[in-house]
Amino acid sequence: MEIQVSDIGHIIQLSVAPVFLLTGVGTTLTVLTNRLGRITDRSRVLEERLREADDLSRPELQDELNTLYPRAHLINRAIVLSTACALMVSLVIASLFVGDALNLDLSKFIAVFFILAMFCLVLGFIFLLREILLATGNLYRKKIIPIER
């Protein structure tokens, strides 16, 4: 197994696009974990207030908590799918190096994992969008933000 410097340069050229994709997925994961953290923090505050609340304010606090739980669930799904995407893109990058270094035809493997990675990324974005729509829909429903007609 002899790898020439030019071969490594060629492999690096092939892996540049997936590496940029991996950077984007990492940034998306940062956004998702920040959203999950905010939802979790807000849930903790509301749960504490609920313990000390009187009967008049209890339903409003419980209603907000009931909105936060599905939001957290959607963000969790988006995080799982985005992480799966990152893992598959990493496998694509590793496969490019292994396939070229060992003269193996891993093109079908690479194509399948890249397509699966894109599928996971799209689904992750769909769950993020659903969470955002749920969050903003709750604001409109409570009339915190007036709807202009």
Image (cartoon, grey):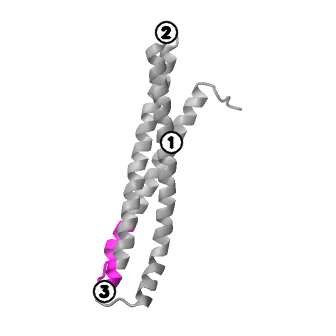
Q: Residues within 10 Å of mark 2 (few under 14, many from 20)?
A: few
Magenta span contains residue 109: yes
- The answer to which quarter of the image holds residue 2 is bottom left
* Residue 122 in the image, given as x and y percentages of width and height: 46, 55
| Residue at 35% across, 83% down | 100
Q: Is 62 situated above or below 111?
A: above
Q: How many marks?
A: 3
Looking at the image, can residue 62 be seen? no
* Residue 132 in the image, given as x and y percentages of width and height: 53, 41
Magenta span contains residue 137: no
**Residue lying furthest top:** 55
Q: Secondary structure at mark 3?
A: loop
- Amino acid type shown at disc 1: Arg
- Counting residues from the N terminus, which is met first, the one under dot 1 or under dot 3? 1
Q: Secondary structure at mark 2?
A: loop
Q: Is 148 situated above or below 93?
A: above
The one nearer the camera, 19 or 59, is: 19
Give left or right: position of 98 versus 79.
left
Q: Mark 1 and mark 3: span between their CA atoms?
A: 44 Å
The one nearer the camera, 137 or 53, is: 53
Give left or right: position of 116 versus 50.
left
Query: Which residue is disc 2 drawn over?
Result: 54
- Amino acid type shown at disc 2: Asp
Magenta region, residue range: 98-114
Q: Main secondary structure of the magenta part?
A: helix
- Amino acid type shown at disc 3: Asn
- Quarter that holds the N terminus: bottom left
Query: Which residue is disc 1 drawn over?
Result: 35
